[in-house]
Amino acid sequence: MHTALPTRSVAVVLGTRPELVKLAPVVHRLGDAARLVHTGQHWDDAMSGRFLQELGLPRPELLDSIGGTSRAVQIGRSLEQLDALFAADRPAAVVVQGDTNATLAGALAANARAIPLVHVEAGLRSHDPAMPEEHNRVLVDSISDVLCAATPENRANLLAEGVSPARITVTGNTVVEAVRRHLPGPDERTGLLARHGLVPDRFVLATVHRPENTDGPATLRTVLTELAALATDEVPVLLPLHPRTRARVEADRLDHLLASVRVLEPLGYGEFLGLARHAALLISDSGGVQEECTVLGRPLIVVRRSTERPEAMADFAHLVAPGPGIGRLARHRLAEGDHGLRRLARLPSPYGDGRAAERIARLVASAVRPAADARTLPLAA
């Protein structure tokens, strides 16, 4: 008779809010077997604590003195503290997701102690060496025992790099079930729009937070100028302001560029999804929004020089570097109107059927126990 994985036997290592969103379905599937470890790469009680509560996640073990430091310091300190944690209480497997500094630190800590390593969302490639995340994801893939590729394209990337097919499984992306679980219902969305004074399909929702768009005053000025130029009384532009972006706006004295847009405080995940579901257009530099827009059926302008998510570019999104192209592409998509929105609503997401977490949890079980044993291993519903 098969028994469940031991309590707290699987260390789920993460460090940012997008990782919380992506790994929440996996943690729920693992149930009591999951042991959440947060490096503190992005941590504050107000925002991160809110996400934990909203996503139904347990309070994690939190590492010390990681947030706000350089990339090298984040990885080094996280690795040192994770190694000490794993030495004191060795997990049966380690799960990491994506390409953050926390992901790399968790992977290296598992590898150093020969603990089976499962990489969720393996095989993403931007082929842009200027992106720190590209180096992180390549390194993590190279040492992972189980690679959970979200799409066939991700699997192809790994095979092209010589990864054994036996290590790779196409699982789909957990973003599909995350969006389905946390998107507010129709009545709640109606109330949300009313509180913001918005008409469905008649507003733009934007987010800007990546260092490539915020750390240089000229680039940030360009992006904010384009957003301001799009805003009208009929089609307002909403901008939930990330703490990084707010700090750069203030430091670079760009406050005047926010006068034409509706600046909001950072949103909870469900609230963001509720607004995004009815936006005429999304404009963002977020990797997660590139995936979420395909589940929500909304068009997206991706303000970046490269992307590791080409699947979204086929129908839902356009990639554009900071500059006048933002406005041109935005006006083109807005001009498609209701017809364009109806077309996207009919298209399936390229990120799977909403069962990724179930597949990933079983792969975790197979990494801990013999594969034949894991096929019937009970997991949390």
Image: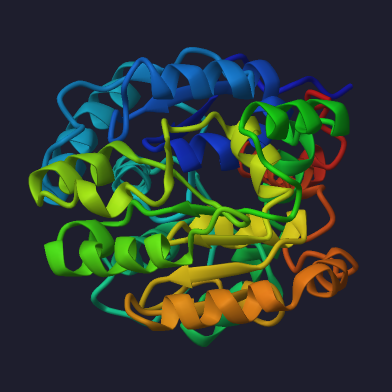
Instruction: Name the one closer to the observer, 281 or 56.
Output: 281
Whether residue 243 is situated above or below residue 245 in the rendered picture: above
Residue for point 39% across, 58% down: 140
Residue 95 visible in the current orientation: no
Residue for point 40% across, 78% down: 306
Instruction: Give the x, y percent position of residue 107.
Output: 37, 47
Instruction: Name the one closer to the observer, 8 or 366.
Output: 8
Instruction: Give the x, y percent position of residue 88.
Output: 31, 16
Q: Would you identify the image quadrant in which residue 369 lies?
A: top right
Tell me which colouring the rendered structure shows: rainbow
Instruction: Give the x, y percent position of residue 223.
Output: 32, 66
Residue extending farthest front: 233
Viewed as shown, does residue 125 lie left or right of 249? right
Work out which quarter of the rendered image holds the N terminus and state it.
top right
Instruction: Name the one closer to the observer, 167 or 196.
Output: 196
Whether residue 185 is situated above or below residue 321 in the rendered picture: above
Residue for point 46% across, 57% down: 286
Residue for point 15% across, 35% down: 77
Q: Would you identify the image quadrant in which residue 60 lies?
A: top left
Instruction: Name the one closer to the observer, 305 or 42.
Output: 305
Instruction: Give the x, y percent position of residue 164.
Output: 57, 74
Residue 232 visible in the current orientation: yes
Number of labels in the image equals 0
